[in-house]
Image (cartoon, helix red, strand yellow):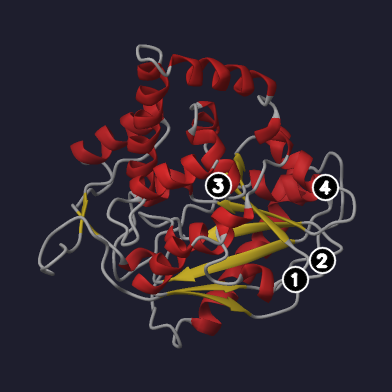
Amino acid sequence: MIFLSKFFHLLTPAKPGLPTDCLVFISAQCCIALFIGLFFTRFWLVSVLYATWWLLDWDTPSKGGRRIHCIRNSVIWRHMRNYFPVTLVKTTELDPSKNYVVGFHPHGVMVAGAFLNFCTEATGFSQLFPGLTPHMMMLTLWFRVPFFRDYLLSGGLVPSDKDTAAYVLRRWGGGNVLAIAVGGAQEALDARPGAFTLLLKNRKGFVRLAMEHGAPLVPVFSFGENELFDQVDNPKGSWLRRMQHRLQQIMGISLPLFHARGVFQYSFGLLPYRRPIFTVVGKPIKVEKKHNPSQEEVDRLHQMYIEELCKLFEEHKTKYNQHTWAT
């Protein structure tokens, strides 16, 4: 795993350059090429042994993962945090005897706030919320990529499927946080400075999940998440937007046409702008456990969640210089 850590640190620069979806896609392709390529070298045994390990370890992602604290605490994530910078803001205590479903908004182009706050210790999650273990959900596809899956697991990421979510939320004794970027990759196509467009109105699966397990819902709003990149205009109905949606349906990831700054100049490039991100964790919403909630009950709790998220935004928007959003 030390080798994997060094390998992926090369793929993940201290000053982030590519948005997460693109970086993940490139990293995954490199890992597949490495795995196959080793078969044609004198190091073929590495791939054989790894393939054996892979089969034996196949179910680990769906059973809460396997985090490695030295990777979560790596100095590279602190450099990444300081680049923007990113701050995790606590507004209330979270009882460590309970399991929680956290809704993260907005997705943004890079998901920098979600990654640094829930997949690393760069912003001090464990110090702010002692007794809680975060699990960030990610597209299941990436956990089928050799080598790369182990790196994802080391940060506390888990596949975004119902069985994995149920396993985390059923854990006895509580203390588990299941973080979900509710808007998903599709929301990234609307991420641009100056406004927030959240895909939330018809996203109710996370609410049903919380009800089935009696897990409190916690709204999280990441101010500044959409300020990191400019994006080529892609209004709904345009040929570009249709093509992006089509690619998303095929590949499972969104491919926004982004740009920001360069290494030595600020007019154009692929590095994100150095703009602060404040990820504000709201108050938990009490959820009554129901094994088979009706659609009316889900709709009611979903509306309550939207109201609490709006309230969180309104209470902090002036402090963090954000003024408009839409659902």
> Which residue has dot 3 on it?
202
Q: Nearer the viewer, mark 4 or mark 1?
A: 1
Circles 1 and 3, Cβ within 8 Å, touching? The answer is no
Q: Nearer the viewer, mark 1 or mark 2?
A: 1
Amino acid type at circle 3 is Asn
Q: Position of residue 51 (x, y in %)?
A: 56, 18
Instruction: Give the spatial CA distance, label 1 vs label 3.
Output: 33 Å
Which of the two discs, 3 and 2, labels the residue nearer the N terminus? 2
Where, by quadrant of the figure, is residue 134 drawn? bottom right
Circles 1 and 2, Cβ within 8 Å, touching? The answer is yes
Tag 2 secondary structure: loop
Tag 4 secondary structure: helix
Going 75% across and 77% down the picture, which residue do you hit?
93
Above or below, comparing residue 196 to residue 170 in the picture: below
Circles 3 and 2, Cβ within 8 Å, touching? The answer is no
Which of the two discs, 4 and 1, labels the residue nearer the N terminus? 1
> Which residue has dot 4 on it?
213
